[in-house]
Image: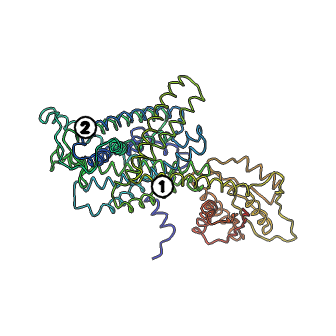
């Protein structure tokens, strides 16, 4: 059975929704109560596995070492407070979004910003994978029969999260709000019920944990390893500062308030879970999470409240991956606009989301889940490193920012960010040293490799753009030569940008047609006046050469051109029409990822509507 193009389009609209107009800015923003679950689900959900991570290291020194979990938790809570207050200042200084990449680029230079970007790209992939795998562990703690199906369940959850994000942030916010707040409520109920039990029946004398023999000596190095594992509770804090534009106006103030609320919730929930685990003598169990053990102890093993706790834990951990899906595509778009990544990573889809970034993250996260086979142990050891690298660069950049600006109370701001920078740098060094042999070495190697790849991409773009650009003294005239008899052909030339390939395509069209129409569809950052000036300089007032500048009400730059071609054909069906498209032919295989992607998509879109004759005017890059 052959599926028609119209059927494909109908199916696409049902799955992902109707296209949103580009001027519908409210479709891109959400109120604070929806922005909190979108940007904070990663940080809030980490309380479901951060305590497990710390206890999993302490138990190596025997059950007696588990008593150190409470001091470690208190230290991490203090660090959370420092980072939250530091990032509130970042939001004030960068109300359009102040992630580590933006702050590092503005204050520390290109190299620091690329290190921050590489660290965050790795962290976002690991965050999505860890969250989804931890969610399946929450489910299997409730029903152990699901243990063999953990990988499959994690992949299904991944597809659901990716689908929700491809529909757009408004739908994602509505989908994620209820489970996130339900998880917060269940943890509060667990904490209140557990505290009530401690006060009225149990008492505040800690239960001894199950006896476990030590396999490693208890020393400073092991304590630091446990501390660095517990710091996985801090991943995702930067997301609000990086996603300020997601908030409705006044976005900066709403983001600052939301960050404070998120910090208070995270610190309180993490302290409650670790504290209850300390007093109830909970020990790590590979098949039952700490949260599940606490629920069994407080609510009872067959209680509906336990079921509610585990289901909401599953949902929040599944939705925690949305922080990565919100920020990974946005960071890729920033890098693409600066030419550090292929330009198509900055394309906005029909639903006003960076769909290529979302699709890439889907594939990368699935790869991590398959490699780890649903086990979070290795991935947890890795992904705190990237986020603390970003913390350190961001806060160091803010110190430089305040020292440059020297506005009101600049010294107080600089000291606050200096404290944050120093604290996160110490933790970063602890993570690298203590976790290096447990897999952190892979991230230490991957970050400079990614930095090199990003830098090489920009270098190649600069070489190509320099070759494609017209020189000021370069001949650029285009004319339709007078003919004794008309050819009877109209050429429509697609103008992606004013460049040598475009000029070559216009010259070709002028030789095979009586009339040429150049069509440029204006992107968000396009300058129509510049295009008109370049056209006038090259074409002049030739009546046979016409420039059409089209506005696009939606994100697509392809649809307006295709509609224009359809209208020309319907106006005069008997007219011979040639569609001329410039294409830069790369010299190296890697260049195919950097060039001509829009041309390829344009050709495919026009082919879907009708069978047409195309002329691809090739410009061979000499470099």
In the image, farthest residue toward the bottom: 1
- Please give the residue where the numbered disc 2 appears in the rendered image: 275
Element at label 2: helix
Image quadrant containing the N terminus: bottom left
- In this picture the colour scheme is rainbow
In the image, farthest residue toward the left: 201
State the image quarter where residue 601 is shown: bottom right
Q: Residue at x 80, y 71 (%)?
A: 487
In the image, farthest residue toward the top: 408
Q: Residue at x 65, y 63 (%)?
A: 565
Image quadrant containing the C terminus: bottom right
- Please give the residue where the numbered disc 1 appears in the rendered image: 358
Q: Nearer the viewer, residue 177 or 488?
A: 177
Q: Position of residue 48 (x, y in %)?
A: 30, 46
Dot 1 or dot 2, earlier in sequence = 2
User: Does 305 sit left or right of 511 as displayed?
Assistant: left
């Amino acid at each position: 059975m052959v599926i028609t193009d119209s059927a494909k389009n109908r199916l696409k609209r049902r799955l992902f929704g109707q296209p949103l107009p580009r001027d519908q800015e409210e479709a891109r923003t959400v109120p604070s109560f929806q922005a909190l679950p979108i940007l904070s689900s990663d940080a809030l959900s980490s309380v479901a596995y951060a305590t497990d991570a710390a206890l999993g290291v302490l138990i190596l020194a025997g059950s007696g070492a588990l008593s150190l979990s409470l001091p470690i938790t208190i230290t991490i809570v203090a660090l959370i407070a420092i980072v939250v207050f530091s990032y509130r200042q970042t939001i004030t200084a960068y109300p359009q979004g102040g992630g580590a990449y933006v702050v590092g680029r503005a204050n520390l230079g290109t190299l620091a910003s690329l290190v921050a970007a590489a660290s965050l790209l790795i962290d976002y992939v690991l965050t999505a994978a860890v969250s989804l795998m931890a969610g399946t562990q929450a489910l299997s703690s409730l029903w152990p029969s699901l243990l063999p199906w953990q990988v499959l369940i994690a992949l299904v959850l991944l597809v659901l999260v990716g689908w929700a994000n491809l529909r757009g942030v408004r739908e994602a916010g509505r989908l994620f709000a209820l489970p996130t707040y339900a998880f917060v409520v269940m943890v509060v109920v667990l904490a209140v019920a557990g505290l009530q039990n401690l006060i009225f029946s149990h008492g505040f004398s800690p239960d001894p944990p199950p006896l476990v023999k030590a396999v490693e000596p208890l020393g400073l190095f092991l304590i630091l390893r446990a501390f660095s594992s517990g710091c996985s509770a801090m991943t995702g804090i930067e997301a609000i500062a990086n996603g300020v534009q997601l908030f409705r106006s006044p976005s900066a103030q709403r983001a600052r308030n939301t960050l404070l609320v998120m910090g208070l919730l995270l610190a309180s929930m993490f302290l409650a879970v670790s504290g209850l685990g300390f007093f109830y003598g909970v020990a790590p169990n590979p098949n039952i999470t700490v949260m599940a053990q606490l629920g069994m102890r407080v609510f009872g093993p067959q209680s509906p409240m336990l079921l509610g706790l585990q289901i909401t834990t599953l949902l929040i951990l599944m939705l925690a991956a949305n922080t990565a899906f919100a920020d990974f595509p946005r960071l890729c778009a920033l890098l693409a606009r600066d030419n550090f990544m292929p330009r198509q990573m900055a394309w906005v889809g029909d639903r006003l989301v960076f769909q290529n970034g979302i699709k890439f993250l889907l594939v990368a996260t699935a790869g991590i889940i398959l490699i780890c086979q649903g086990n979070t142990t290795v991935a947890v050891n890795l992904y705190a490193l990237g986020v603390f690298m970003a913390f350190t660069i961001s806060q160091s950049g803010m110190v430089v920012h305040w020292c440059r600006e020297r506005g009101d109370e600049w010294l107080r701001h600089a000291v606050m960010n200096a404290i944050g920078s120093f604290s996160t740098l110490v933790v970063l060094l602890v993570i690298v040293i203590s976790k290096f042999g447990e897999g952190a070495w892979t991230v230490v190697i991957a970050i400079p490799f990614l930095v090199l790849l990003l830098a090489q991409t920009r270098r190649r773009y600069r070489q190509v753009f320099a070759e494609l650009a017209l020189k000021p003294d370069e001949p650029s005239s285009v004319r339709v030569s007078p003919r004794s008899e008309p050819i009877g052909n109209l050429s429509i030339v697609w103008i992606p940008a004013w460049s040598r390939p475009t000029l070559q395509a216009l010259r070709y069209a002028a030789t095979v047609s009586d009339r040429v129409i150049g069509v440029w569809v204006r992107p968000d950052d396009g300058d129509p006046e510049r295009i008109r000036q370049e056209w006038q300089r090259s074409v002049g007032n030739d009546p046979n050469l016409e420039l059409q500048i089209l506005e696009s009400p939606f994100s697509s730059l392809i649809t307006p051109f295709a509609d224009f071609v359809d209208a020309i054909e319907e106006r005069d069906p008997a007219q011979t029409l040639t569609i001329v498209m410039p294409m830069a032919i790369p010299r190296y295989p890697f260049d195919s990822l950097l060039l001509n992607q829009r041309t390829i998509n344009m050709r495919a879109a026009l082919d879907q509507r009708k069978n047409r004759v195309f002329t691809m005017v090739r410009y061979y890059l000499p470099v």
